[in-house]
Amino acid sequence: MKDTLNIGQPVIEAKGLNLVFQTGDGPVHALRDVNLTIGKGEFVSFIGPSGCGKTTFLRCIAALEHPAGVTLTVNGMTPDQARQSRAYGYVFQAAGLYPWRTIAGNVKLPLEIMGFSKADQEARVRKVLELVELSGFGAKYPWQLSGGMQQRASIARALAFDADILLMDEPFGALDEIVRDRLNEELLKLWARTGKTIGFVTHSIPEAVYLSTKIVVMSPRPGRITDIIDSPLPRERPLDIRDSKAFIDIAHRVREGLRAGHGDD
Amino acid sequence: MTERALPILTVLAAIVALWYAGAVWLNSTWVYDQAQRAGTSVTLAEVIPQTMSQARPLLPPPHQVAAELWKGVAGQKVTSKRSLVYHGYVTFRGTMMGFALGIVLGVGLALAIVRYRVMELSVMPWAIISQTIPIVALAPMILTVANQIGVDNREVPKAIIAAYLSFFPVLVSMVKGLRAPDAMQLDLLRTYGASDAQIFRKLRLPASMPYFFASLKVAVAAALIGTIVGELPTGAIEGLGARMLIGSQFGEPLIMWAALFAAAILAGGLILLVGLIERLARARMGAPA
């Protein structure tokens, strides 16, 4: 099973990361002493109850939150520098497509902002729409697409400028189970084809186990990591792998980790 | 189509019926007075026809107003001082100037307020206070001041009064519209390293358009009212407002009512026009047809 642990060079490194929000009720420890290394090409899921800081950690990587002191590096840079060098694409829970732009126009948005040439924009839009299997929908408006297709378009938008890291914050949380299964499969295929490093926030145990090479279990008050599980599952994963013994064992360990973190409730 | 037309026509018929009843009731006083002075008595059957065609009725019945309106629109050369087309055009021109000025002012202030937080605290209260001052009190002052400082053109103070009323809905809507994008959408642009100018151009401005067009319908009606009010106290000789004033001062209710309806028709036309522009803009911005 050596090939399941093919961790590349570290691209995201957090060492003793702390983040405190000042609120009306006093300081809230959103993240405490988070230590994590994510290697190139890994698919890392963050799972935990709300308030455990899984989204906050993703936002720290994306430089949307700014923890005190540099204890987090992305591609060896600070998160701010990493953003400037277009290190990551971010996918939010809602597709957040602009209703006044076509699907192609929405995918083009980051390219326009980053100043890609017109010809390059067209080529890239065509390429990523193909990647998420939305070729032929470029001229449609968002309201003409289903929720699942809209989310795929938003993934295409995050991929358009060819960042090495894809950060996804519960991207399929608002979709129904059937659509979510399909998109999970497609996401794995996309990951295999592109070799991106993916950080994926979810609150679904099967989703985390099915997708990840590494599962990070977190718990709240203060937000912290309680378990890190390196998945023994092969990279090639048909949907029915979810009935295998290995899959069920990992799911069980994740559940135990979540329960332990919740012991004081 | 018929199921939509039926309720509309029913309400319209009820209004016309009530109007006729009101005209009979109010105008009959004059008929009875005449009869009393002549020492005769009149039956109701004799009274009713006499309430329908008085030269100076208290409340002119619909057909008299319609006839006067028709005379004013079609019965004159359009350049005549008696033509409602002429006066309507003068009012329309004033409304458009004030409307344009109001849009520029409203959008400009909204941009400043959204960009600089201090502007909200320093400007917004004054904008709100400005709308609490009755325009009929303010209009004569604006006209007088404009005249004093040597602005001979009556169009300018009229446009200022119209803009004074019409900038406010645009301002309020645009502030709301420019702030409509939620935190997630702003975060998304931040992950692209977008500048403030890019966030404004790519997100805030297009997101504010529905708010903008909604406010235009209110603003164009406000501009028309402002223009008419601006035409009232001038001793002005042009415009539907002046026409109403003349009708009132010379005791010609028909002229007043015809001008009133001309103004209402103008307002309806302006709102239809703004609605049409909105539909075209929405279609261009990909809204479902």
Image: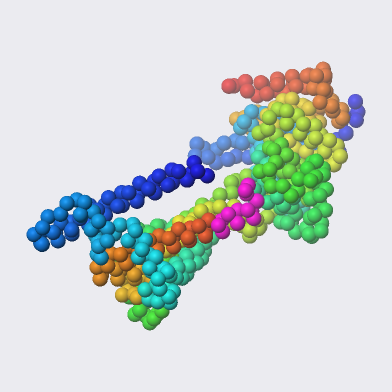
Q: Is residue B287 magenta?
A: yes
Residue at 30% x, 71% y is B246
Would residue A162 be counted in the magenta stretch? Answer: no
Task: Give the main secondary structure, helix, strand or loop, of the magenta stretch.
Answer: helix
Q: Report whether A168 appears left or right of B59.
A: right
Can you say which quadrant of the picture contains the N terminus of chain A?
Answer: top right
The quarter of the image holding the C terminus of chain A is top right
Q: Which residues are magenta?
A: B276-289
One can see residue B2 in this view: yes
Q: Nearer the viewer, residue B161 or A57?
A: B161
Q: Residue furthest top?
A: A245
Question: Is residue B195 found left or right of A183 in the rendered image?
Answer: left
Give the residue furthest to the right.
Answer: A2
Q: Position of residue B155 (x, y in %)?
A: 42, 74
Q: Position of residue A11 (x, y in %)?
A: 80, 42
Residue located 41% across and 68% down the image: B73
Q: Is residue A39 left or right of residue A25?
A: right
Number of marks in picture? 0
Residue depicted at 70% across the width and 27% down the height: A177
Which residue does the image show at 55% across and 41% down from the upper left?
A22
Residue B223 found in image quarter: bottom left
**Which of the 4 image quarters holds residue B47?**
bottom left
